[in-house]
Each structure stands twice: as structure tokens, then as C-alpha cells.
Image (spheres, helix red, strand yellow):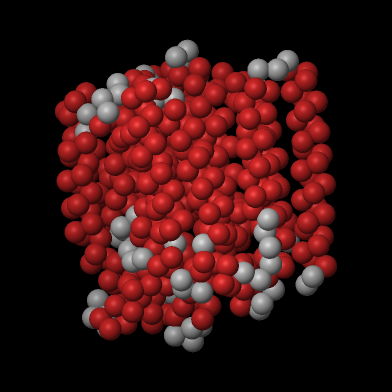
Amino acid sequence: MLKKIFSHSLIYGLAPQIPKIANLFVLPIITQFLTEDDFGVAGLIGSVVASIAVFANLGLNVTLSNSFYKSPGSFHWRWRQTYGFLILWNVPFAFLMAILIYFFIPEIAKENTLYIILANVIPIVFFGPTSTIGSLYFQLNQKPFQIGLRNMIIGLVTVLLNLIFIAYYEMGYMGWFLAGGISTMLLQLSYWFPMNIKYNMKPIFNFKWRYLKEQLKIGIPTIPHYYGSYLLNSSDRMIMDVLKVSTGDIGKYNAAGNVANNGNHVGVAVGKAISPFLLKYYRDNKEEKAKLLIYMLQTIFLAGSFIICIWMKEIFSFLIRNETLKMVYPLAIIMLMGYNYRPMYLGSVSKLMYLEKTNKLMRISLTAGIISLTLNFTLIPIFGFEIAAIVLFIGLMYMGYSGYYIKEYRQVEIVKYHPVLWLIATCLLTISVYFMVELNILIKVLITLIVLIIGVYLSIKLNYKIKSNE
């Protein structure tokens, strides 16, 4: 099970994230040609794009996954209708995104307004949800090579384009936008032929409105849920802009986020990887196995993030070749440890999604997002932009653990996940590693080995229990 989870995480879940993670490995080169303002522009526009991205699929990815398992005989017809509807929807969606980007472009980037907008909206207009449909199809059919090969190539292309545009042509923030736009187009194009020709998943534009209305009733209530994730992970840059925080300070925060957000990418990746397993466990009434799987992942996340964070100072010294930006590593520690919320979050939310209680999900993520929004507007003017990292941690902890206490989950709860204990462990480890990062290197090596041994032992033990319950 452990081997399968790792392989599926790398192929299924990490596939859409590889271009983002690949950028991490060129930071030592490109940061020599970037300033705080470049990071600030990229972070702000990225936040703006994320603010509307949640509306791209209208939550219908949930109904696609459910129909695959609940209606195996008719899911093909259902998917084609959804595909056709989303292609049409993506045209007005792209127009809305363009307008939003236009109003938030900072003064120092005004001269490239048109290029920034085109780099973000062209992939949406021409290919719509093709990569979403394609990657989900291969993920649920457990065909890792189909996803892995595409994204390995696209990831390498993205790295190459970043090097060319930023390091060679010295285009600054525009290098990121151009590389992102081109790589997204290539990824979308790679899914078009197999989905439309080989698997005959051609979109149906003359779709049944009655069917779509039923699906939208399930999907749309998830939008506030997903939007809460945006408010937590990306809105802080927009709030800083509204509060007149300098583009340079936004850039510092974004530099820390660029490194720490890889923890979020891994969390999303693992979530996609284990979804087929959790859905099968729920269907077969094997709740104990689902719990053990969540426990195993939470152990791996805590041990892995702790080890990375204790070396965060050295990581920043290596990755960031800008003396000002490399000093924000304490913010990255807090952010990265916050992303440990993900496994326990999946424990409650996956069950509610499987039971299609999607209208209750906003109580979890949207509430967490509102808490984050309120605290940022209140505390940033008092304590500065750095406080946003602590606000992010608080919001993520709420989102990860509050689901176990809402009425709808308690009504369907079969096994106890003991969320309070995991929450306390996460907070204690975060406080510890925040100070341990300054320790002597030899002491940090010893601590790393101890945490690694404990993490591996517990993970293997939990993996054995999962197998023994087969």
C-alpha cells in the first residue's frame, strides 16, 4: 500500500503540479536576475488568477468522480455532456479573468498588461477543461504512465522556458507568465487527441439541461468550499496590495510562499492519489482502512515537513541568490508546517463528498477563509506583512480539523480520528522546528536522523496494518 501510494502520488497527483515544482530547481539561477518587485508582480497576479480559478469547473469535477464509481455503465455519456458544457462555459470565464487581471496589474507592470492577460486566458479559451477531463480520466482508471509522461515533458519544457526567458533574455516577471502560458497550452494539447479520438470522449454540446442542472446542484455548492482554499492560500497577496503594502514586501512574502507552497502542491497531489482508495473503502464499508491510510499519510507529512523545515535556512541560502529574499526563511517554515493539515482534512471532507453532502463543505473551508481574510485585514496594518504567515497557519489548521466537528460528519462517523491529538502534535512540532532551524548543523543532523527513523518506523507499521486488513 505504501509503495502504491507513493507511486500514485508522484504520477497521478503530482502530474499537474510538476511544472510548478520544477521551477524550484532553477531558482538558484533565475533569482540572480529577479528582484523583489518581480516576485511581487508574479505573486499578485497569481493571487488574482487563483481568486477566479475556482469557477473554471463549477465544482463538476466532484460529480465526474462520483459518476465514474457510482454509474460505471453510463459515466462515458455523462462525462461527454459535462465536457461540452464546460468548454462553452470557459469562454465567459476567460473574459471575466481578463477583466479581473486588468484591474489588479500594478503600476510597474502596466506596459505588459496585454501580454500578461493573454498568457493567462489563451489556454482557457482554446482548450477549456481538456486537461482536467483527461487527467481525471487517467487518474480514476489508474493509468499513471499517461499522466506521468506528459507532465514530465511539460515540466522540463517549463524549466527550459524559465531559464531562457528569465536568465537569458532577462525578462523578469514576464518570463514566468510566458513560460506558464506556453506550458499550459502544451499540456492541454497533449490531452486533446486521446480524449477526443482514442477514447471517443468528444464533447456533447447538445447536452441535456435537466441532467446538467442535477449535476450543478451538487457541484456549485463546492465552489464556496474551494474558494475558501483560495482565501487561505492566495488572497493574502491581494489584501497586501489593497492595504498598500509595497510591491517589494509582497515579493518577499511571495518568495517564502514559492518555496513553502510546494508542500501544498504535494498535499494536493497526495489527495488526488489516494482518492480512488478512499472511495473504494467507503463503498466497501472499510472505514478502518481509510482511517489507517490517513494516519499513515499524516505521519509521513509531519516527519517530512519537520525535516525540511529544520534545514530551511540552508535551503534558502542555496535556492535564493538574492540577499534580501533569502532572509525570509522563517516565514516559509510557518507556511510549510501549516500545509500538514491536508491528510486529516481529507479524512473528513472525502467522506462528505462521497455522500454528496457538498452543501455542507463551505462550513469548513469558507469559514477558514473568512477567518484568514478578517485576521489579515486586522493584523497586517499593525504587525506588518510577516503576520500573514501565522494567519495562514491558523486558517489551515481550522480547515484541516473543523470538519470532524460539524453535525453532518458526526452523523456518518464510524471510526474516531482523534483530530485534537494530531492538531496538538502539529502545533508543537511547528514551534519546535521554528527555533531548531538556528541550531548547530551537527545537532540538526542528529535530530533529522531521529525524526526520519521514527517516521519510517511508524509509516511501515501503519502500512502493515492496512495490508493485514485486506
Q: Residue at x 80, y 52 (%)?
A: 460
Q: Residue at x 23, y 57 (%)?
A: 93
The percent position of residue 50, horizontal first and vertical second, equals: 34, 46
Along the horizontal axis of the image, is 403 left or right of 296?
Answer: left
The answer to which quarter of the image holds residue 445 is top right
Question: Nearest the camera: 424 or 293?
Answer: 424
> Which residue ends up furthest to the bottom in the rendered image?
73
Q: Is residue 132 above or below residue 65?
A: above
Question: Nearest the camera: 353 or 94?
Answer: 353
> Which residue ends up furthest to the top in the rendered image?
323
Q: Residue at x 78, y 72 (%)?
A: 470
Along the horizontal axis of the image, is 32 left or right of 298?
Answer: left
The percent position of residue 80, horizontal first and vertical second, equals: 35, 76
Q: How many marks?
A: 0
Q: Residue at x 37, y 46 (%)?
A: 370
Question: Nearest the camera: 289 or 77?
Answer: 289
Q: Is residue 307 visible?
A: yes
Question: Nearest the camera: 466 or 421?
Answer: 421
Q: Is residue 370 above or below residue 107?
A: below
